[in-house]
Image (cartoon, helix red, strand yellow):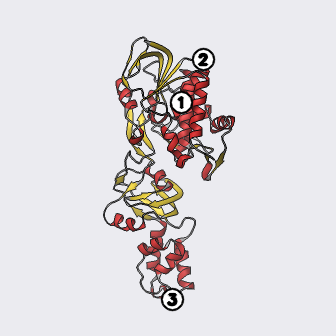
Amino acid sequence: MNSYDVIVLGAGAAGLMCAMTAGARGRRVLLLDHADEAGKKILISGGGRCNFTNTGTAAERFLSQNRNFPRAVLAAYTPRDFLALVEKHRIAWHEKTLGQLFCDGSARQIVDLLLAECAAVQVDLRLGCKVSEVTRGEAFRVATSHGVFCAASLVLATGGLSIPKMGATGFAHQLARQFDLKLAEIRPGLVPLTFEGAALDLMRPLSGLAIPIVASCGKARFAEALLFTHRGLSGPAILQISTFWREGLDVALNLLPGQDARAVLLAGKRDRPRAGLRSLLADLLPQRLAAVLAEPGPELANLPDRVLTQTAERLSAWRLKPSGTEGYAKAEVTLGGIDTAELSQRTMQAHKVSGLFVIGEAVDVTGWLGGYNFQWAWSSGFAAGMAA
C-alpha cells in the first residue's frame, strides 16, 4: 500500500491549489482525478481566458446558509495573493468590468501555473484514476484503478454536479453521506432560465438579442447584460439572478436602466406626436424587441397617457415567471453542498472526522458570477493545504 501525508481527490482549481500548498509545507501529496486532464473547467472558463478572480471579493457576494462562513478563509488568501502568483509566472492579465480579472492569453496558462507549482513541490498527480472506495481506520484508505493509497489527511475537491459533460459527479456528496456530514439543498446555480407558453413564444423570435438591463428577484438586483435564447433568458444578469430565483417566483427586468421610463415616453409623445408607440420604442430599444412590446398602433398624440404609463411600467419592471432552469448541463456552479456547519471556518476540516477536509464547489458556498467562485477555490484550497 502506498502511503502519503495528504490525498486530494479532484484536480480542479481547489484541488490543485490545495495540493501545491500542502506540498510547499513539505507534505507528501497524492492528487487524484478520474479525468484524463487536470483543470478541465478552468480551461473552458471565461470564454477560454479564465476569469481567475475578482477584486471585489467579499463574503457578502457569496451565497451560503451561513453567509459569514467564507469570511475568514477569503481573508487569509485574497485576490491580491492569487494575482501575485499570476505575475510570478509572467502571465499577462487585464481587468474587465466589475472587477473581473482575465488572462490576456489562454486559460491554459492558469492550469500550467498550477501544474508547475505542484511539480515544484513533488505532488504525485495521477489522472484517469477512478476511486472505487474510501474508508477510514487509523488513516484514510483510498482504493483506485491505480492501486490502494493511504494518508492521514483526505481532501474532497471533486466539485459539484454542474457541467456533467466535463466529468462532474456527485462523488463529494456521496462521501459526505458516508461520513455522516449534512448536506444543504443542492440545485443548479448561475444558470439560464427557461419559460413556457406565451412568454416563450415572445422570446423565441428575439433569440440571440442582447441588451443591458437590471434584473431583480426579491431583494437581489444585478445590472448586466440580458440574452434572449430559444428556451428563454440567459446572459450575465440572468445567470446572476438565477441563484436567487426559486420555483414560483417572478423575475423583474428593467429594460431602460438609469432612465425614468414614463418621463421618456411622455417626452416622446410631446416631441413626436405623429410617431407610433412602436416607432418611439425602437429609438430606445433594439427594433426586434420594440416590435414585440408594442403594436404599430395609433399616433402618440391619440394615445392616452395611461397607456404610456402602463407601457412604462412594463419597460421598468417587466415581470416574468420562469418555468425552470436549463439544469446542471448549463449551470456554471452547484448551489448548496456540504453544510458549512460541519466544517471549520479556518481550515475547512470536518468537525466530526479528523483529517477530512472539504473545499471548493463541494461546499455550500457559491459566489456571484465574475471570478468569485475561482477565488473561493483558491482560498478554500489554500486553507486546507495549510492545515492538512
Image disc number at residue 26: 2
Q: CA distance from mark 3 to mark 2?
A: 78 Å
Instruction: Please name the residue shown 47% across and 16% down the image.
Output: 151
Q: Residues within 10 Å of mark 1 (few under 14, many from 20)?
A: many
Mark 2 → mark 1, Cα distance in angstroms: 16 Å
Res. 24 visible in picture: yes
Q: Name the residue rendered at 35%, 63% in the picture.
A: 200
Disc 3 versus disc 2: nearer the observer: 2
* Pointer 3 or 1: first along the chain: 1
Sooner in the amino-acid sequence: mark 3 or mark 2: 2
* Residue denoted by label 1: 16
| CB within 8 Å, label 3 to label 1 | no
Q: Is residue 137 above or below residue 358?
A: above
**Residue that badge 3 annotates:** 274
- Residue flagged by tag 3: what amino acid is it? Arg
Can the viewer see residue 355 in this picture?
Answer: no
Picture coordinates of residue 261, whole percent (x, y): 52, 72
- The x, y position of residue 321, in whole percent, is 37, 59
Q: How many marks?
A: 3
Please tell me which residue lies in front, 68 or 191. Answer: 191
Looking at the rendered structure, the kind of residue marked 1 is Leu
- Residue 106 in which image quadrant: top right
Query: Mark 2 or 1 closer to N-term?
Result: 1
Label 2, residues with CA under 10 Å away: few <14, some 14-19, many ≥20: few
Residue lying at 52% horizontally and 74% vertically, measured from the top left: 262
In the image, residue 227 sits, relative to residue 38, either above or below, namely: below
Task: Provide the secondary structure element on which disc 2 rests.
Answer: loop
At label 3, counting other C-alpha atoms closer than 10 Å, the crowd grade (few under 14, some 14-19, many 20 or more) is few
Please tell me which residue lies in front, 77 or 229.
229
